[in-house]
Image (spheres, rainbow, N blue to C red):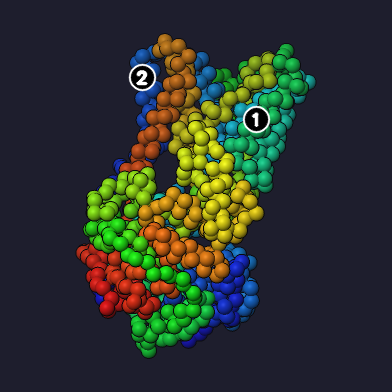
Amino acid sequence: MEEVLRLKNIVKTFPGVLALDDMNFDLRKGEIHAICGENGAGKSTLMKIVTGVYKQDSGEILLGGEPVVFEDPNEAFAKGVAIIYQETSLFEEMTILENIFLGHEYVKKVGPLTVIDYAGMRKEALEIFKVMDIDLDLDERAKNLGMASKQMVEIAKALSHHSKIFILDEPTASLTQREVEALFNIVRSLRDQGVAIAYISHRLEEIFELCDRVTVIRDGKYISTKDVTTTNKDELVADMVGRSMDNYYPKADVEIGGELIRVERLNQEGVLSDINFHINKGEIVGFAGLAGAGRTELALALCGFTKIASGDIYIEGRKARIRNYRDAMNAGFVYVSEDRGKFGLVIEMSVKENITMPQLRNVSRGVFLDNEKELALAGRFIEEFDIRCPEPDFLTENLSGGNQQKVSVSKAIAIAPKLLFLDEPTRGVDVGSKAEIHGIVSALAQRGATIFMISSEMPELIGMCDRIYIMKNGTIAGEVSRAEATQEKILKVALHMD
Amino acid sequence: MEQTSLRQAPDGKGKFKKMLTTEFYLLVFLVAILVMMRIAAPDFYSLNTIMTVLNYFSYLLIAAIGMNLIIITSNIDVAAGAIMSVVAIVIAFVGKTGAPLPVFMAVGMVVGLVLSWVNGLFITKLKIPAIVATLATTQLFVGALPLVVEGSIYDLPASFTWLAFRAKLFGALPASVVFAAVITVGFMLFMRYSRFSKKLYAVGNNKYAATLTGINVNKVMILAFVIAGPLYGIAGTIIATGGQRVTTTMANGFEMTLIAAVVLGGTSIAGGSGKIIGTVLGAFILSLITPAMNYIGMSSDWSDAVMGGIILLAVVVASISTLTKKKKTIVVPDAVVSASASSSGEVK
């Protein structure tokens, strides 16, 4: 079969991170080629390079055998490479017709004027819909469409550009089973018409149902490319996981106490269903799962940021009602967000101000802040966690990612929480800071804190946690103890095999 | 595997329901006011009153169209009134020499264009939020005028007030109304048939996605201001030529009425939506309020409060209808899908 796209030895670095290392990928006319890998394996970075959003540091992109350089996404689009993102980029207030043809409207001459040719666009759009076997009202505004319809419009838009290469980025993440079937039919019919499709997914069932070939990548490296007929799920999982466990995790043994929190039959419409779990005092409990499995959503619900529909939460055996974050804090819960820039820190403020923020009452005298008390509190954490700042009044935005994360964690620990929710505590921090943060987490547990830890890095969970719950599709799909935890076991449950 | 296809959900919306747009409700409201006035105060329908209402409506509408374009790109312009005040003074200087309407109106349009362009540059090139940039230039324009002119320019010649007093179609219809009609029709066609108008909406909807579609966001925003400027110039000219005296504060504060007309007309202040026809209706309703209240014997002190009430009502209705609207989803035939019944089981 004719090769339409080849990526050769692509390298891409971001400050402090090697995102893609000698990556290879090829795509043939009329095939559906899956790209799979764990969260953070580099799938999205790779596709952003193909579509011109990022530029590679080295390596080559060959389009139909010719080397190309994409300066921006429009150039890639113009050369027939279309990407359909998980979250669509439609213009909500505009109609389906306007969305499909935005930027390349059909025009005709009326006297000296060039005007938009609505009739022509309508005809073409209906042709495309016929090919896709869908029927949507062209005058409907995008904001009134559901997720699946929006994706159809995105596909129609790409077809209107006569794109020959489609990249679908986790297209089924927010679709129902029925919508998935319909999408698959469209994708298959596109393939049969000679379109080349790169299909990013970590749902193995889908890959075997839909795709012709599959390329596995891991930690930014190319691992393998196979025909789906000659491989199986176990082999793919083994490729995705690798065998390495080379990080150092200073998990100390801690005496586990009685039950701190128990959650029964917790539901949140469309997000979480029938969640049951418990955490004992002094435990570090991990929550594993793929992106979108509902881990962050669970933490947010327990902390009162979002409403739960039904279910009971018991704290130390007593039934608790958590209506908002204030209630959660009174119960001793503190949440540290994965997005520290947005939700964890006020980066325009100093290290001192950030650490003292949740407990201004304790560092005040009357209505005024007491600078000495503030400095004492902040100083304690700066020293203890080795936050590298020249002075407590240093602005947090000027710190490195790892040190920012330490400030974020300090702020949470400063109010001595009973249960600390850490959401991806080491995302985007360098290796050195990672180990330090792991040290802090372990030291906290030794001092009696209990930790709810969400992480997409399985070695981190396996290395740090006493127990690990595995989430999938908004529910808890399994549990493994420290002794029996392996990456394969976790991934198999997260991918819903067996 | 069974064949499934994507068909749009029948939403039970007939053609009639589709007609129930913001514009439709505004039209009903407008007709209601007109009917009420017919019953409550038949005198309202005198030629003189109608022409006064239409004259106010014409310059309100012309400037509001400019404001509408700016708001569609999700910006705002609170300097519009100040720009029109500057236009009024500048054309009074020109008009005092006896220059005819085409000359000083052209000058007014150029002044409007340049000042509005400056606003656009501040907002795009220096990334100053529109409200801050135009608030600052408002102060600057309003503050500079009294330094140049002491109070007012008066004893303007008949050539200056020709537009207001002499230029009448069929002996009655003010020429300003003709201007407004031509401009409105022109912009309605422009917003439907020009490719540029799609870019205005796209930028207002989602700047990032617009960039990815190859739209030069800054250029589109600047052009919105550049187009609005001459419209302010024309509106300012109509305001200034209403009498023999032009003061330095003639159109100060008028921007709020413009924004009100645009918002009442269904344009979201968040940008990305809004039609010219809505602005036409919004401006017409606002033009009626003060004279209508006079005729039914209410004090004009009430007019601002009534206008505020109407605008509040309009935005509350709009907000409720968005909050209650359901998203359309595709229907997949005889769908019975078990709701993600994932079997849980511990890994052994």
Residue behind mark 2? B36
Q: Is residue B140 left or right of residue A465?
A: right
Q: Which mark is residue B138?
A: 1
In which chain is the residue bearing label 2? B
Sort mark 1 into few (<14), some (14-19) or many (20+) by Cα contacts within 10 Å. Answer: many
Q: Residue furthest bottom?
A: A230
Q: Quadrant of the N terminus of chain B?
A: bottom left
Give the residue displayed 43% in from the left and 29% down from the top. B311
Q: Position of residue B283 (x, y in %)?
A: 49, 29
2 or 1: tag closer to the N-terminus: 2
Q: Residue B221, located in which quarter of the rendered image?
A: top right
Q: Position of residue A154 (x, y in %)?
A: 44, 62
Give the residue displayed 29% in from the left and 57% down from the top. A261
Q: Residue A130, located in which quarter of the rendered image?
A: bottom left
Q: Position of residue A197 (x, y in %)?
A: 45, 75
Asked if residue B195 is positioned above or below residue A498 in the image, the reply reads above
Same subunit: marks 2 and 1: yes
Q: Quadrant of the C terminus of chain B?
A: bottom left
Looking at the image, which is closer to me, A115 or A486? A486
